[in-house]
Amino acid sequence: MNLTLKIWRQKNATSKGKFVTYKVNDISPNSSFLEMMDILNESLVTRGEDPVAFDHDCREGICGACSMYINGRPHGPDKAITTCQLHMRRFKDGDTIVIEPWRARPFPVLKDLIVDRTAFDKIIQAGGYISVNTGGIPDANAIPIPKVDADLSMDAAACIGCGACVAACKNASAMLFVSAKVSQFALLPQGRVEAAERVNNMVAEMDRLGFGNCTNTGACEAECPKEISISNIARMNREFLVAKLAAPKPRVDSGGGI
Amino acid sequence: MALKYSSITKKVIMALAGLFLISFLIVHLGINLLILKNDGRESFNMAAHFMVTNPVIQTMQWVLFGGFILHILLGIVLQLQNWMARPQRYKVEGYSHTSFFSKFMIHTGAVIFAFLIIHLVNFFFRAKFGEMPHIMINGEQYEDMGLLVIEKFRDLPYVLMYVVWLLFLGFHLDHAFHSALQSLGLNHSKYTPVAFGVSRALAILIAGGFILIPVLIFIS
Amino acid sequence: MAELNSKIPKGQLAEKWTHYKAHTNLVNPANKRRLEVIVVGTGLAGASAAASLAEMGFKVKNYCYQDSPRRAHSIAAQGGINAAKNYQNDGDSVYRLFYDTIKGGDYRAREANVYRLAEVSNSIIDQCVAQGVPFAREYGGLLDNRSFGGAQVSRTFYARGQTGQQLLLGAYSALSRQVKKGNVEMYARHEMLDVVLVEGRARGIIVRNLVTGAIERHAAHAVVLATGGYGNVFFLSTNAMGSNATAVWKAYKRGAFFGNPSFTQIHPTCIPVHGDFQSKLTLMSESLRNDGRIWVPKLKEDAEKIRHGKLKPTEIAEENRDYYLERRYPAFGNLVPRDVASRAAKERCDAGFGVGETGLAVYLDFSDAINRLGKSVIEARYGNLFQMYEKIVDEDPYKTPMMIYPAVHYTMGGLWVDYELMTSIPGLFAIGEANFSDHGANRLGASALMQGLADGYFVLPYTIQNYLSDQIRVPKFSPDLPEFKRTEAEATERLHKLMNVKGNQTVDSFHKRLGHIMWEYVGMARNEAGLKKAITDIQVLRAEFWKDVKITGELNEINPELEKAGRVADFLELGELMARDALDRNESCGGHFREEYQTPEGEALRDDQNLMYVSAWEFSGENQEPVLNKEPLNYEFVEVKQRNYK
């Protein structure tokens, strides 16, 4: 296959970027999208040009590193996959493909197609955990958990933190990401203990970082490579309302001297 | 104020105000449909009279105003924040599968608001502060709101303007009811699909019902 | 030759760890606050260690090359994690898990380490459940288990086909909590370039900030390497693109011994290679072997026709299929350990029965299971794996059997560590896949997650205190000491040297060539002549690399080509050591199969008389032959036998 690529090139976080057009030829339909990018980069390096920088690592759809906005959709035209799982057989010979980085104020571009997603880490740090230390834990089967709840929790926990939900949302909202973590724990008895505090803190951090507001368009759900449902957002809204109405006290860690 | 509250709180207020406005639209439509009743505008004018005189309704009027203003102002604040959240736009965008009208709530909302002002000037303020024709019903004198309506809707451009406006209202409502439930966290694997149906039905019935009135008046 | 002290506690097997914990030195809370620990890597071992140490009160600095600690490659582990809970009441016990692991490793691991691993396995499951890891459950609300290779009990806990992800996110959440509390300083997009020794002890690391390109010096009282394995030496492997050996290799060159470098695990169920452009291999979880049956055509003509696309696998009659694992190993069938399954696949393909366009594939067939259990059950168990397969291969595995072939997956070898997980450099620890310790010559399925978390949550936090307890009087280190500056200068010089080669060939092209050498001669089957050839070929390739590699871009910016070049330069040295170790080990054991040493039936033939030792290689200078140190393995409690899965 022969393709025309229009790729966002930006030298670093402070410089202005622009689209640059490249041609790639003889691409096998069986190669993955990132392998096509590898081939482009090999030819760029051989010509002494700077290859296109993009995040990628596991290349099996689970690490969440890859993040390309392809022809107007995060992770490209297929449903329920990451960019690394997209294969060239999905395109036609002669196609033009426009590749952009994720666009959101909390995700600044670092170079070309690489964006800084530290904002997601910060949201998790604000409360995306159950506050237990290592050791001194009761037996794993001490608390039975209904299979339905465990399964729903797993559905939410499948989030890979890639940021496609933010990229797809017309408001650059991070609600799907945040709600997935809130839901995972809200559905488990272990997570209920701190549920109110967690949702408060995570939502506050999300707002502080400058993500947009959710307007229930459902674009996030449609583009999520792990098909995480916006019912999680509803659950988070519910959890948040309940937490606000209950007005929890801010936490003071006494923490045994640690 | 609006800036201080969390995004979810704002959405919840937005949803509550929206639901309240939907309930108002239903009442409004119910009264309007009375004008189609062939009784010399009697029921309609009686209802209109009730609306402008009943103290409870008069109080609710201010609540309604508040609801409108809250819904509009919050809508603007949310939208500004949303635009700020993506300072650099995509070259190619909008190919994700979403409900179509959900993407244009601020636009449909703005159109509705613009027409709303005309609407208020023509009917509401007129009824409240302006000169009104009068009619005798059962020996008592009432303001003839019905006549005002019928005269207005004999004018074709005016009818067309209303139809367009109400279509936009329908578009806006298509993403209203279920979206409000979602914002309030009221979802359920079984009933949420029903809420989508209800939402669409409300959009069609409310917009359709309102459109029916100018169109029928114009034809007759 | 150096003296190797494995520091295995005395006493009965089952009492060693308890005894150790009861008598080891601890650090009191006030002193913990003053002691700093560097943890490199944020996978299962790194994240769990960093979080646990921080919870205890140590000041931790944690590093990863990814943009977020949550993306470490542990996330890609699919199948599950073993524990001796015996929830299924099928006769499991700590001893049985220990025994299976020792036997699965072909008697090339330390008894005491493996027993400790089995002992703490149960706590790991408790810990993860408490963290909110949504393991699979039965309708009664209790945890579900599945079976894995090399065991006759169901002891594997799982979260769909994403167990590694869920366990890692559990550790990541614990880590995030400590970052928020200020007990962990997190350095993402930082790659370790070297370890700094002060007076013979590990006191810090040199890292490159991958965004700015700045070289930084970081000091601490102890350094923990949790940097994973080195499977990417083979270019094509199931490892992540960024997985690299730089940290362990630099530690080796600073004096840490490298244990059993040749012990590589070739995983039997990967999606076969399909073209030159291919950048990585995708694993299909071993759990698939619970319900899938592996076969090739019985007749060579059929295999031939399939390869040319003239026949479909579904058209081959039952009697013309060779379920070779069930035939050769009736007791374990499709669930034989990985090394055995991989070699059996290679044997069939080499004999001309392979399928797929290249003839390098065998079938993994679910039709029996689908008929028996129904499609929905299979979908619930493996849905995401089937979907992944279909995305890559463009065939529906519910209808036509999957094609699989072995691929490099895990490295049992790694930095040599003692019972306390300390390398031969005082103050330098290695945990998880980065060390050599618990899997011997072959790792059983679902044991990598177990070992990573055991090391990080329950072993290192104890054993490191034994070292740190005599460091409490050592003041905080300054990274301005001359040792730091010298090491930094060396790291910087090496980067300049790489940039200044200005040759004509890309980094990837060298990596691919190295991969071919490794797969051909140091892969699934090895022999003396091949290994000798590999050593010279790698030396030639390495020389060519330093003369002709081409790296674009600058030092002070995001430069993926430079990152790759540094890693490949290290692989080019490590590959040679792997070949040397394989050449030294004149036997076949586990994943290490020397064609000269096999039974008449083609099974691995060990030499327990002469080779029952851990190879601990010692660096002795650039382009010098390394020194082989031997740690003898004494089996006090287990009778050493030939492995038998028949």
Image: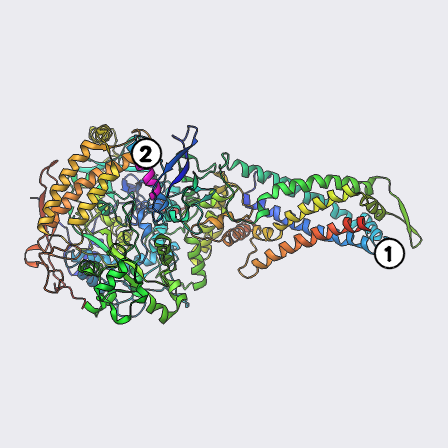
* Residue under label 2: A44
The number of numbered discs placed on residues in the rendered structure image is 2
Instruction: Based on the picture, tell me whether residue C79 belongs to the magenta stretch.
Output: no
Q: Which mark is residue B39?
A: 1
Q: Main secondary structure of the magenta part?
A: helix
| Residue C583 or residue C56, whichever sits in front | C583
Location of the C terminus of chain C by quadrant is: bottom left
In the structure shown, which secondary structural element does the residue marked by tag 1 occupy?
loop
In the structure shown, which secondary structural element does the residue marked by tag 2 occupy?
helix
| Residue A2 or residue A185, whichever sits in front | A2
| Residue C164 or residue B202, whichever sits in front | B202
* Residue at x 20%, y 55% (from the top left corner): C439
A64 sits to left or right of C249: right
Residue B105: x, y in percent?
61, 44
Kindly indicate whether the residues beneath marks 2 and 1 are on one polypeptide chain: no
Mark 2 or 1: in front is 2
Location of the N terminus of chain C by quadrant is: top left
Q: What chain does badge 1 belong to?
A: B
Inspect this view and state whether residue A193 appears. no
Check disc 2 and give the amino acid type.
Leu
Inspect this view and state whether residue B146 appears. yes
Residue B49: x, y in percent?
83, 50
Check disc 1 and give the amino acid type.
Asp
Residue B67: x, y in percent?
68, 45
- Quadrant of residue C440 within the rendered picture: bottom left
| First to last magenta residue range | A35-44
Decide: marks 2, 1 in contact (CB < 8 A)? no
User: Crowdedness of circle 1 by 10 Å Cα count: few (<14), some, many (20+)?
Assistant: few
User: Crowdedness of circle 2 by 10 Å Cα count: few (<14), some, many (20+)?
Assistant: some
C544 sits to left or right of C219: left
A84 sits to left or right of B193: left
Q: What chain does badge 2 belong to?
A: A
